[in-house]
Image: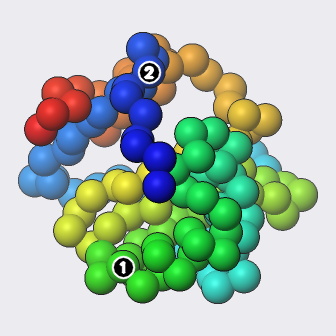
Amino acid sequence: MPEPRPPAPNDIRLRKIRDETLVAPHWPDGFAMRCFEHGDAQPLHALLTEVFDDGTDGPFDEWWPRISSDAEFDPALCFLVIDAKGRLAAAALCWTRAFVKDLAVHPGARGKENAAALRLYERLGMMPVAWEG
């Protein structure tokens, strides 16, 4: 398996201290969030492959057995954003140890630059942290 790529200049690593009540998100018109269903595995792999394009996930037939059998994978912690046409627009694949493994937004569904997204994450109580820890 190829080595993970180093962080790109615009990559951000964030952490949130969970000491407050979470507020339900407001989704833009035409977008809705739902939990992962088994039939979502291939579209999720395709999204991750397109967004990260680093080859570390490998082909679907290798990726899915590895992900779905991981002790920290729980489909109830995989959140998908679906657009008005029923397409996968974004996904947050979370691990059971309170780690967001992957957060991906399809290029066609992106509407803001990293600076605006970072301000949103900071308003939600997240803070940038070093990649090493």
SS at mark 2 in the image:
loop
| Of the pair 100 and 20, the residue shown nearer to us | 100
Looking at the rendering, which quadrant does residue 82 occupy?
bottom right
Horizontal arrangement in the rendering, residue 20 relative to residue 126 (left or right):
left
Which residue occupies 32% across, 67% down? 95
Q: Is residue 119 above or below residue 85?
A: above
Mark 1 closeness class: few <14, some 14–19, many ≥20 residues within 10 Å: few
Looking at the rendering, which quadrant does residue 52 occupy?
top right
Mark 2 closeness class: few <14, some 14–19, many ≥20 residues within 10 Å: few
Amino acid at dot 2: Ala
* Residue furthest right in the image: 85
SS at mark 1 in the image:
loop
Which residue occupies 72% across, 82% down? 39
In the rendered image, the quadrant that contains the C terminus is top left
| C-alpha span from label 2 to label 1 | 27 Å
Q: Position of residue 75 (x, y in %)?
A: 47, 80
Q: Is residue 12 above or below residue 45?
A: above
Q: Is residue 25 visible?
A: no
Which residue occupies 17% across, 27% down? 130
Q: Is residue 114 visible?
A: yes
Q: Which residue is mark 2?
A: 8
Q: Which residue is mark 1?
A: 70
Amino acid at dot 1: Asp
**What is the tally of numbered marks visible in this picture?**
2
Which residue occupies 27% across, 36% down? 14
Q: Position of residue 128 (x, y in %)?
A: 23, 27
